[in-house]
Image (tube, helix red, strand yellow):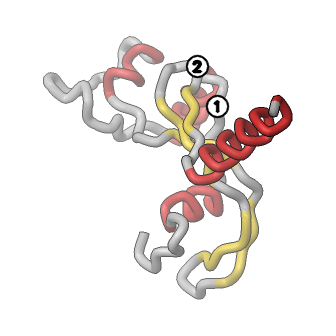
Amino acid sequence: MENFVKSLCLIIFVSVFTFIPLSFAGSDGAPMVEVPGGKFKSGPDLHEVEVKSFKIDKFEVTNAQYKKFMSDFPAPDGKDDHPAVEISYFDAEAYCKAQGKRLPTREEWEKAARGVDGRLYP
């Protein structure tokens, strides 16, 4: 009976975590999701590209989040929850590094945007 219960618990555990996408939070508390690796059609010519699995923020970095990192950031009043814009590549890279993250590669960004159904116009 004890082995049956252990087996049942394992089946339930595997079933639940097979169908529910895992989510994570970065050091900044922002929710992240894991994008599974694999091949996908990329670019305007839809050539095949393969990427390894990676984690990416679920939402864009907001003005409020970026202002915590760079206090002199001129965030527009009343738009704390809007995505931060007009940030250089190097400043975005520094923000990511400070959060223990990194910017996605072009291929990773496209894989995440295309979704699991390979959207033609992500």
Q: Secondary structure at mark 2?
A: loop
Occupied quadrant, residue 47:
bottom right
User: In this rendering, does residue 104 appear at all?
Assistant: no
Residue 63 image offset from top left, x and y in percent: 32, 27
Residue 116 image offset from top left, x and y in percent: 54, 66
Residue drawn at 41 percent across, 14 percent down? 68
Give how far apart the Cα atoms at labels 1 and 2 are: 8 Å
Amino acid under disc 2: Ser
Q: Nearer the viewer, mark 1 or mark 2?
A: 2
Q: Secondary structure at mark 1?
A: loop
Height in image: 62 above or below 55?
above
Residue drawn at 46 percent across, 79 percent down? 120
Residue drawn at 76 percent across, 56 percent down? 52
Marks 1/2 in contact by CB < 8 Å: the verdict is: yes
Height in image: 50 above or below 85?
below
Q: Which mark is residue 88?
A: none
The residue beneath circle 2 is 27
User: In this rendering, does residue 111 appear at all?
Assistant: yes
The residue beneath circle 1 is 101
